Image: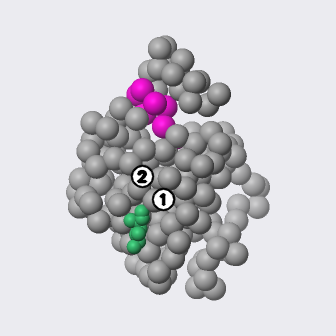
């Protein structure tokens, strides 16, 4: 783990999920339900470096990053991390989430099993913008073995910079949720 990263990001882990090496620090005041810029990040082992790059990138934009790991490189199971991140969003603890694995696909599938989560895998900025504007996606998934860091950060910017357009799209999102 990069030394400066540990200082910059609150690592907010659930002990049963992570190794002893993981740093745990919970907010004693509980979830910041009204923080519009609070976002959860997670990944599997295949995407730790890219996840850290995303964290640093969006912290610089003023996002309150809750990184739930993992921070150690051993092989792990993306469904655990996708579900854990999705629960942070579904509960209202975080408004949005960004998750990553090798392809972005497996962790996205796990996240979408959690009620209220609409997560898309994006390898281009157009899709990243559209999943917010049309699908009201509350989570973005990226494949660290698919896109390089520069494109990944542009994808993140497209996702975070877009707003849901509502209207006819709200009707369709409601159909997904019903
Ligand atoms: C891990 O090897 C890989 O299977 C995982 O990161 C992801 O690509 C699964 O969808």
Query: Which numbered circle lies on residue 117?
Result: none
Question: Is residue 16 found left or right of 41 in the rendered image?
Answer: right
Depth check: give the residue in front, 102 or 22.
Answer: 102
Identify the residue under disc 1.
107
**Image height of 143 relative to 90, above or below:** below
In the rendered image, residue 126, in percent from the top left (x then y), is placed at 27, 36
In the rendered image, residue 49, in percent from the top left (x then y), is placed at 36, 71
State the image quarter where residue 60 is shown.
bottom left
> What is the distance, in whole Å, between disc 2 and disc 1 at their CAs?
7 Å
Q: Indicate the secondary structure of the residue bearing disc 1.
A: helix
Ligand 1 closer than 8 Å to the CB at disc 1?
yes
Q: Residue at x 39, y 57 (%)?
A: 104
Mark 1 Cα within 10 Å, few/some/many (few <14, many 20+)?
A: many
In the rendered image, residue 11, in percent from the top left (x then y), is placed at 57, 68
**Image height of 159 relative to 165, above or below:** below
Query: Which numbered circle lies on residue 141?
Result: 2
**Image height of 172 relative to 3, above or below:** above
Q: Is residue 7 visible?
A: no
Q: Residue at x 41, y 41 (%)?
A: 160
Q: How many tags in the picture?
A: 2
Looking at this rendering, what residue extends furthest in the right direction? 29
Disc nearest the viewer among 2 and 1 = 1
Q: Is residue 135 visible?
A: yes
Q: Indicate the secondary structure of the residue bearing disc 2.
A: strand
Mark 2 Cα within 10 Å, few/some/many (few <14, many 20+)?
A: many
In the rendered image, residue 80, in percent from the top left (x then y), is placed at 59, 66
Give the quarter of the figure containing the C terminus: top right
Q: Are marks 2 and 1 in contact (CB under 8 Å)?
A: yes
Q: Which residues are magenta?
A: 132-138
Q: Residue at x 40, y 35 (%)?
A: 131
């Amino acid at each position: 783990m990069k030394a400066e990263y540990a200082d910059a990001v609150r690592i907010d882990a659930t002990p049963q999920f992570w190794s002893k090496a993981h740093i745990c620090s919970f907010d004693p005041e509980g979830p910041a339900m009204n923080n519009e810029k609070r976002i959860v990040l997670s990944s599997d082992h295949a995407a730790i470096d890219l996840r850290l790059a995303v964290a640093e990138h969006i912290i610089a934009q003023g996002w309150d990053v809750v990184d739930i790991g993992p921070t150690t490189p051993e092989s792990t199971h993306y469904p655990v991390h996708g579900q854990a991140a999705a629960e942070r969003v579904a509960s209202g603890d975080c408004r949005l989430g960004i998750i990553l694995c090798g392809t972005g696909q497996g962790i996205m599938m796990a996240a979408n099993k959690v009620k209220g989560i609409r997560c898309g895998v994006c390898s281009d900025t157009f899709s990243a913008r559209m999943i917010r504007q049309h699908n009201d996606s509350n989570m973005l998934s990226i494949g660290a073995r698919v896109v390089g860091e520069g494109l990944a950060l542009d994808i993140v910017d497209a996702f975070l910079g877009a707003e849901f357009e509502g209207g006819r799209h709200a009707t369709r999102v409601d159909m997904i949720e019903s």
